[in-house]
Amino acid sequence: MRILVTGATGFLGSHTALALQKAGHTVLGLGRRWQQVPQLVRAGIEPITADLRERDAVIAACAGCDLVVHSGALSAPWGSRSDFQAINVDGTAHVLAGCAAHNIGRLVFISSPSVLSNGRDQLDLVDTAPYPARPISLYSASKQQAEQLVLAHPTPSVMLRPKAIFGEGDQALLPRIIAAARAGRLRQFGAGQNLVDLTYVENVVHAIELALTAPAALGKAYTITNAEHPQLWAVIRRVLAELGVQSQLRPMPLPVALLMARIMESISAVTKREPLLTRYSVLALARSQTHSIVAAQHDLGYQPQISLELGIQRTIAALKQPTKVD
């Protein structure tokens, strides 16, 4: 099939595009930073340099495609409301317009389990749980709005909510934590016993491939995880130790961390610079967040292909490699 992948120059998008190309599909990649992923072009992926905010370009990119994987997004703990709206909400509307204009057979939309987060401990959360009364962040709010657009649109669609994606090429989750530890700024928020689902990137790609054809999945949302529920701070300590990063990870009471984050956010609202701490990131690192994948197992036939242990080993090995200039 001919498949368009948005966000193809990003972490998940690049892994997805390469996997689909390897599976024998013709893959078009929409993204902005092609110089950072020359391996995609070498693999035969057709590059389309465009921004999700460019409605006409996004619609045109869908021409001649059978399926679309919409993984492009502004995924960040901090940003302006207008940017989240323009990229995550309006950008999704542009993708949907392209799907309608070119009669796309199916859309797989990559959302986030944070749309269900209420800032408290949540264990074995099911996909059909209602949105919280108040979104936990601007990012989560934008993803809620985007999900509603997808659900209301006539294009056949499946929504996936991968939780805490990590793996080779990640520039957000573990690298941010490692950088904070190296700078002496990382603290353990709360008691450090919280359980948080993590998801190796190849497992997310596997779920996307299943969602492209699974007949029972249309019109539904599925959380994707490794289904292992590790203690988050134990994983963080292990990664730091294996990378030789010295960090005492002194505990900080959660109320203190949230107060500091609120103050930093207030300052950043004036300076327009990302704060060192946000309430969203503090809660993500302090609260237990585990999800049921029973629905994904039943409707998609999804099972994690790579264990958490193997995924961590591969990720650590990649982080130890010197940066290559390609």
Image (spheres, rainbow, N blue to C red):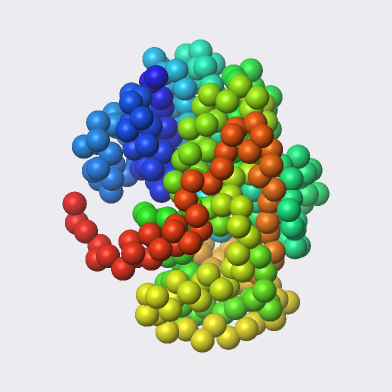
> With 153 as the anchor, is 102 left or right in this view?
left
Q: Which residue is depicted at the point 55% across and 34% down?
A: 109
227 to 33, vertically: above or below: below
Residue at horizontal 23 percent and vertical 43 percent from the top:
38
Q: Is residue 200 left or right of residue 9?
A: right
Residue 10, percent from left and from top:
40, 46
State the image quarter where residue 270 is shown: bottom right
If the image is split into quadrants, where does the N terminus sit? top left
Where is residue 244 drawn, in percent x and y? 37, 80
| Mark count | 0
Percent from the top left, x then y, of residue 11?
41, 48
Q: Residue at x 49, y 46 (%)?
A: 305
| Residue 217, quarter of the rendered image | top right
Does the image show residue 50?
no
**Along the line of sight, the residue nearer the viewer: 234 or 266:** 234
Which residue, as the protein is rendered here, is positioned at the far left?
326
User: Left or right of 20: which side holds 224?
Assistant: right
Q: Residue at x 50, y 55 (%)?
A: 307
Q: Nearer the viewer, residue 37 or 257?
A: 37
Q: Height in image: 175 above or below 234?
A: above
Residue 43 in view in this figure: yes
Give residue 15's position: percent from left, percent from top: 38, 43
